[in-house]
Image (cartoon, rainbow, N blue to C red):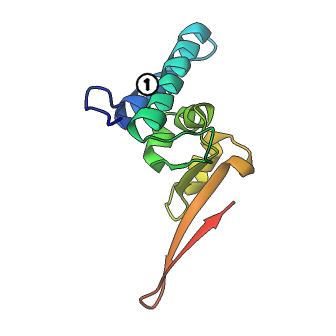
Amino acid sequence: PATTTADAVDYKSIVSKCTEQGQTDEKEDKKLRKKYMKQGVALAQSYLSQTLNLDVSIVDVEIVLENEDVLNTDGCLASCFLDAGCARIVVNGTSDKSEEVMEVCRLPKERMVAHVTLQGDSVVVEKKVL
């Protein structure tokens, strides 16, 4: 069945919820942080299954996240999509902040992919680095 605009979960709403989670001090308010985490995961699951029509129980999903979004959410966005069923998180490996992004995620190397695009003499080479 086709999804309508009303049913579709917007990616930015997931980023917004993860930003709230990332900005909540875990030591001061664990319950609120956990609430935001659960809401973010529910939004991400809906986004993957309803908006993108993916079944993460059948296919391994690698989702490409903007480096800035991962940094602004203190890595919560990456964890959110992994909890929602994604197999790996893909980030821009040629960015100035790629190393910082991988550190803030605090994920095992099996769950992270750095996408690197090298441009030479009119040849573009794409490479995944684990």
Label 1 neighbourhood size at 10 Å, few (<14), some (14-19), many (20+)? many
Q: Quadrant of the N terminus?
A: top left
Question: Can residue 38 be seen?
Answer: yes
> Farthest residue in the front direction?
1
Q: Quadrant of residue 106?
A: top right
Q: Which residue is mark 1?
A: 17
Residue 20 x, y percent position in the rendering: 45, 22
Estimate the x, y position of residue 36 in percent, counting from the top left: 50, 18
Position in image of residue 121 (x %, y %):
45, 91
Residue 129 drawn at (x, y percent): 65, 64
Image-based side of 100 in relation to 10, left or right: right
Residue located 49% across and 33% down the image: 73
Can you say whether 67 is above or below 45 in the image? below
- Viewer-proximal residue, 124 or 2? 2
In this image, 48 relative to 102: left or right? left
- Looking at the image, residue 1 lies above or below residue 7: below
